[in-house]
Image (cartoon, rainbow, N blue to C red):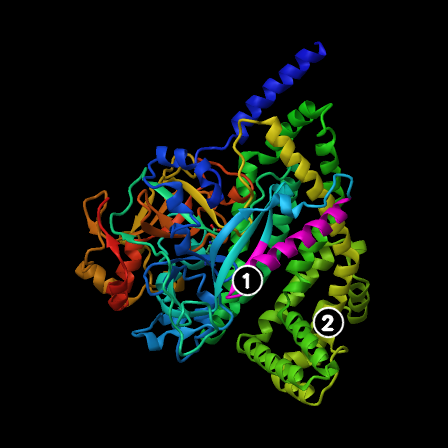
Amino acid sequence: MNRTLKTLTAAAASCMLSAAFFDAHADEGMWLPSLISQRIEDMQAKGFRLTAEDIYSINSASLKDAVVLFGRGCTGELISDEGLLLTNHHCGYSQIQKHSSVEHDYLRDGFWAMNRDEELPNEGLTVSFLERMEDVTDAVLQGYSPEMTETQRDSVVKANSGKLVEKATAEGNGLRATVEALYYGNQYFLFLYREYSDVRLVGAPPSSVGKFGGDTDNWMWPRHTGDFSIFRIYADKDNNPAPYSEDNVPYRPKRHFRISLGGVEEGDFTFVYGFPGRTQEYLMSEGVRYISEVSDPHRIALRTMRLDIQKKYMDAGQAVRIQYSSKNAGVANSWKKWQGEMKGIRKMGTVGKKQEYEKAFMEWARGTEYEGVVERLDSLYGLLEPYSYATDYYGETAYSIELVRFALGYNKKLTESMLSSSTDRIAELRKEMKKMAADFYKDYFIPIDRESFVAVMEAFDRNVTDDFKPEYFKESLTRYGTMEAWADSLWNGSVFADSLKLKKATDSLRLLSEDPAVKFGDAFDDWYKKEIRPVTKRLNSEITLLNRDYMRGQMEFSPDRVFYPDANLTLRVAYGSVQGYSPADGIYYKPVSTLEGIMEKDNPEIFDYNIPQRLREIHAAKDYGPYTVTDSKGNITVPVCFIATNHTSGGNSGSPVINADGDLIGINFDRVWEGTMSDIVFDPDLCRNISLDIRYVLFIIDKVAGAGHLLEEMDFVSDR
Ligand code: ARG
Ligand code: ASP
C-alpha cells in the first residue's frame, strides 16, 4: 500500500471510529451558559421554547439568576421572590444534622419553620449567584510564549488571573471571582459570583422521606427518595450580602422559577441548570484503565471495611446513628458510585476503544505538531501510576482516621496561638479551637475510629510496597508488633482521644507535637509532601501540558465532533428528555415512579424503608390534593421521581430541572447506577439523571408536613 493510500485508509478508519464511539451523542454534554447560543437551535429542535437570552443574559434577568452554587458542592434554585431556595436533602444534610440532637432529632423527624423567626441560621454555609462569566484567554496568557516551560506558563497564568480577580472584585460587596481553565488550559474564563452567607434552614422532611431507601437505593432506579430541603437567603436592607444578623431581611432575587404542575411524560424536553463538579471525558486510555481497574477496586475495598464497622455500631444505638449519619453517607456515596463506574467502563469496553482511537490519532498525527503526544502521555501515565496508587491509599487509610485529622487541625491552631504575640489573635484562635473541639467530640465515637484504623492500616501494610511506605510507618509497626498494639498506644496515649485531657493540655499551654496522634499525622503528611506530592505534581503538570495539545489535536482530528469542556464546578446547561432505559437483557425501566412504589417498599422493620405513619394514612385515604397522576393501571396516585438523559455529575445535586417553557418540574439529585461512568464516558443508552418530581415536593410540604404556608410565596403554572 502506498503512503497516501495508507493515510487515507487510516483517516477513513479514524472517522468511522470517532463517529461510532466519540461523536457527541444526542444529549451528551454540559454546555457553558454564555455560549449557549451555539446549542440553542438543537435545544429548540428538541422542544425548548425559550431563547438563549432567557437562559443567560448579563443585561437583564435570566434563568441563571435563579440558580445558585449551594455551599461548595451542590446546586440550589430560587422559588419565590422572598429568597426561598430548594436544594436536596443530602445537600442540606450536614446542616440538618448539626441542628439535631437526641431531643430534637430533625434528621429523624424532619424540621419545619412555621414562621420566619423559626428559620435556623447556618454558620459557614454560603450560596453564590453567578453575576457573569467571560472568556479571558487572551488576558490570562498575556506575556506567555511557547518556549516557556509549563512551570513558567503556570506563573504567567497565576499572575494574570490574580490581577483579573483583583480587578473584578474591586467594588467589594460580597463579590467573589475565579479564573478557570477549560479544555486543559486551551481556554480560560472568569467567573464572577455574588456570595451570600446568611442562609437559613426553613424545612426538611424526615429522613424516612428525604433519604428514603438510604444507601440501599442510592444511585439506583427505580427510586422513591424525597430528596429535598428548603432554605432562605437573607440580605441586608439593600439586598446585599451580609453576615448573619437579626436585622437581615429575605433576599429579593432578580429571578425565581415558576413551578409547573403540568408534570412529565416520556419524551418531554428537560434541561438541568447547575454546577457539575468534575468530569474527565477526554482522559486517555491509560488514565481510564487506572481508574477502572486499579483505583476504583482498591478504594472500594478500603471503604467496605470502614462502612461495615460503622454499620455495626450505628445499628446498635440511636446516638451513634445520629453522630455518624452524615459521615457514613459521605463514605458510602462514592463507594457505591465507584462500583457502578468501574462496571460501566468495563461493559462499554472504554479502555480498548480509547486505545483504538489513540492508535488512529497517532497515525493521523504523524508529521504534524501532534506527533508523539499520545506516546508521551502514555509513558507519563506509566510513571505516575505507583504515585497515584500511594496517594489513593494515603487518602483512604491514614488520612481517613478521624482522630488524626482532628489532632493535626487542632494542633496547628494551638501552635500558632502559642507563637503569636497578638492577644487578639490568640483569643480568636482559642475560640476557634473550642468550637473545633466541640464539633469533633459531638460526633465522635472511638470504637468506630479505632477499629477502622486497624482495618485500613493493615490493608495499607499489605497492599502498598515497602518503597512507598513512610519510614515512620515501618519503624513504628516493627516497634508495636501489631496494628492493635499501635492503636492502643494511640487511643490510650493521645490527649485528643479525651476532651477533658485536651482541654487541660490546652489550658496549661502544653506543646502537643509529641502527642502520638499528631506524630502519626505529621509523619504521613511529611512523607506525602516530600516523597509523593512533588512527583505527582511534576508528572501531572507535564500531563496537563500534553493534554492541552492532545485536546487541540483531537479537535483537528475530528472536526465534526462537538466538544464540550469537562465539568469544573462552573455553571452548565445539560439538556435531554425524559426516557426510560434497559439496564440488562429482558428488562426495561419506565421513566417515572409513584407513591405506589413507596408503599410497595414500605417496611417498618427496615430502617431505610420505614415511612412516616402520616404517609400511610394519606395513602389509605387517598387524600392527595391536586398532586396526582393516573398510573398505567388507571390508579390515581402521586408522582415521585423521574429519569432523563441529561448529562449531569456530582455537584448537580439540587439543580433545577426545567421544562420547555423554562418552568421548574423537578430537582435533580442522582444518576442511575448503570450510568455512573458518565464522568468518564457517556452512554446514551444507559446514562440517566434522577430527579424528584416537583409535585411530590409540594405534596410532602403541604399534605405530610403541614407547612402549606410556604406554597403561598410560590408561583404556579399548570398547563403542559
Ligand atoms: N448519590 C447522590 C449523590 O451523589 C446522593 C447521595 C446522598 N445519599 C446517600 N444515601 N448517601 O450525591
Ligand atoms: N448526587 C450527586 C450530587 O450530590 C449528583 C450526581 O452525582 O449525579 O451532586
Q: For residue 486, which numbered disc appears in the image?
A: 2
Image quarter (top left, top right, bottom left or bottom right) of the C terminus: top left
Crowd class of label 2 (few under 14; some 14 to 19; many from 20; radius 10 Å): some
Callout 1 amino acid: Asp
Judge whether residue 542 is colored magenta.
no
Looking at the rendering, which quadrant does residue 580 occupy? top left
Give me the residue at 32% from left, 63% from top.
611
Residue 36 at least partly seen: yes
Looking at the rendering, which quadrant does residue 554 occupy? top right
Q: Quick check: 356 left or right of 461? A: left
Callout 2 amino acid: Trp
Instruction: Using the image as rendered, state which of residue 74 and residue 60 is in the foreground.
Output: 60
Residue 600 at least partly seen: no
The x, y position of residue 81, in whole percent, is 32, 62
Above or below, 198 relative to 334: below
Q: Where does the magenta region start and end?
A: 149-178
